[in-house]
Image: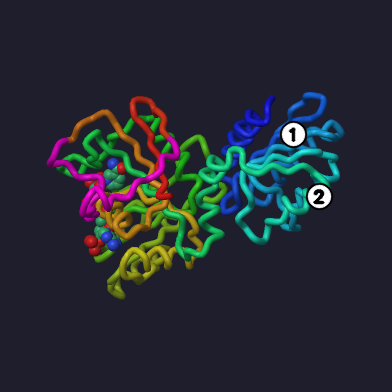
Amino acid sequence: MTEAQAIARALELARQGWGRVHPNPLVGAVVLASDGTVTEGFHAEYGGPHAEAIALAAAGDRARGGTLVTTLEPCAHHGKQPPCADLIVQAGIRRVVVAMPDPNPIAAGGLASLERAGLEVVVGPGRREAEDLNAAFIHGVGPSGRPFVAVKLATSLDHRIADPAGHSRWISGDEARDWVHWFRAGFDAIGVGGRTALVDNPALTVRGAIEPRTPPRRVVFLGSRRLSLDSTLVRTARDIPVVAVAASLGQADSAALLERGVTVVGANGLEESLVGLHAIGIQSLVVEGGGRLAGSLLAGGLVDRLAWIVSPVWLGDTAIPGTRGFVVPSLLQAERWRIVERRPLGQDTLLVFDRR
Ligand SMILES: NC(=O)c1ccc[n+]([C@@H]2O[C@H](COP(=O)([O-])OP(=O)(O)OC[C@H]3O[C@@H](n4cnc5c(N)ncnc54)[C@H](OP(=O)(O)O)[C@@H]3O)[C@@H](O)[C@H]2O)c1
């Protein structure tokens, strides 16, 4: 296996921790032993063994003189696990290839410590992919004070999210819906607008092959709306937490929600709403529409990632648009997003874009 293949494999391994390790990063590692043996590991569980430690343990003495390839700078601090940088030196590894430095100042320092110990260190191969994989983690160690926000929309070819009567079940097919459940599992919370909560009465749970370590909280951006006490969300609030973010909920409405186990966050505007969610521990959020909420988030510059599922169906001009309330004065002022991923999901197409 070449180092380039090992980086690709380590990224694939890292992805297997999705839904189980956040707010910690996804990490994969491969040991290329000097006798040609290849061993691998990934961070599979929050607080559990690190990817490098697993790959090194599997290699044993064969690691001596070999190369370790990893998606993130090995840690240098004593956290829930011993420092990986020390393990790498003790294992007799000669060369370390790292996709990206650790943006977390508490865990960083591994590269310097490996260099001090005389190992050959290379940083950068696969960096873009590693950063894309850990975008929420990188955002989380930054100063924004709000969650990492992804917007997920399933639209027709003409960018409509529901027919003229508001029906959106189902625009996309089974594979796309399975992917959405997988995607949800990697976030602290799943959010929708107040109209979507009313029209679709969604459960916003993860129901698929993947079981998240902690079920994402469910968030409704009510604005000036109310949340029906008969809604699925309110009725199941004691099983999986529900947060209602509201601008002007009366005392009686708030009390009725609180009594049923719903957390109420008072906030004016989306920015304040997101800060309020961050304050109760929500570091990453996937917003699943509707169009008004998605449009307002875009207009506010509050979307970090857009996961867009396009289905081969036309819904026409009277159907509900994918985004509303977002005006761009001219092409010159239009922001261009960066493509992160594009692939088929059955008959549908997944497109993932990041703002930067
Ligand atoms: N295909 C899909 O992926 C998909 C996904 C979800 C929903 N849908 C469909 O979308 C339709 C509903 O979408 P919609 O666009 O009508 O409504 P929506 O975006 O679900 O709801 C808008 C709600 O968000 C609230 N809100 C809070 N803060 C806001 C802000 N700063 N800006 C804008 N809104 C804010 C609004 O409050 P105010 O009332 O105070 O403005 C309103 O309650 C349904 O038919 C549903 O089936 C499709």
Q: Which residue is mark 2?
A: 86
Q: Which residues are magenta?
A: 316-341
Residue at image position (34%, 51%) is 232
Position above or below: 334 against 68:
below
Which quadrant of the view contains residue 238? bottom left
Residue at image position (29%, 57%) is 299
Q: Position of residue 190 (x, y in %)?
A: 41, 51
Q: Give the farthest residue toward the left.
A: 318
Q: Position of residue 354 (x, y in %)?
A: 42, 46
Under tag 2, what secondary structure?
helix
How is the structure coloured here? rainbow
Residue 331 within the segment the image draws in magenta = yes
Side of 280 where 203 appears, left or right: left
Residue 160 within the segment the image draws in magenta = no
- How many labels were placed on the picture? 2
Position above or below: 36 against 332:
above
Side of 159 where 102 appears, left or right: right
The dot on residue 180 is: none
**Quarter that holds the N terminus:** top right
Residue 198 appears in the picture as rendered: no
Residue at image position (59%, 36%) is 11
Which quadrant of the view contains residue 193? bottom left
Q: Say few, some or many: other residues with alpha carbon within 10 Å of mark 1 (under 14 / 14 to 19 / 20 or more).
A: many
Q: Which residue is mark 1?
A: 31
Q: Position of residue 32 (x, y in %)?
A: 75, 30
What's the magenta bit mostly, secondary-structure-wise?
Answer: loop
Q: Say few, some or many: other residues with alpha carbon within 10 Å of mark 2 (under 14 / 14 to 19 / 20 or more).
A: some
Alpha-carbon distance for marks 2 and 1? 16 Å
Position above or below: 17 against 38:
below
Counting residues from the start of the chain, the first of labels 2 and 1 encountered is: 1
Residue 295 appears in the picture as rendered: yes
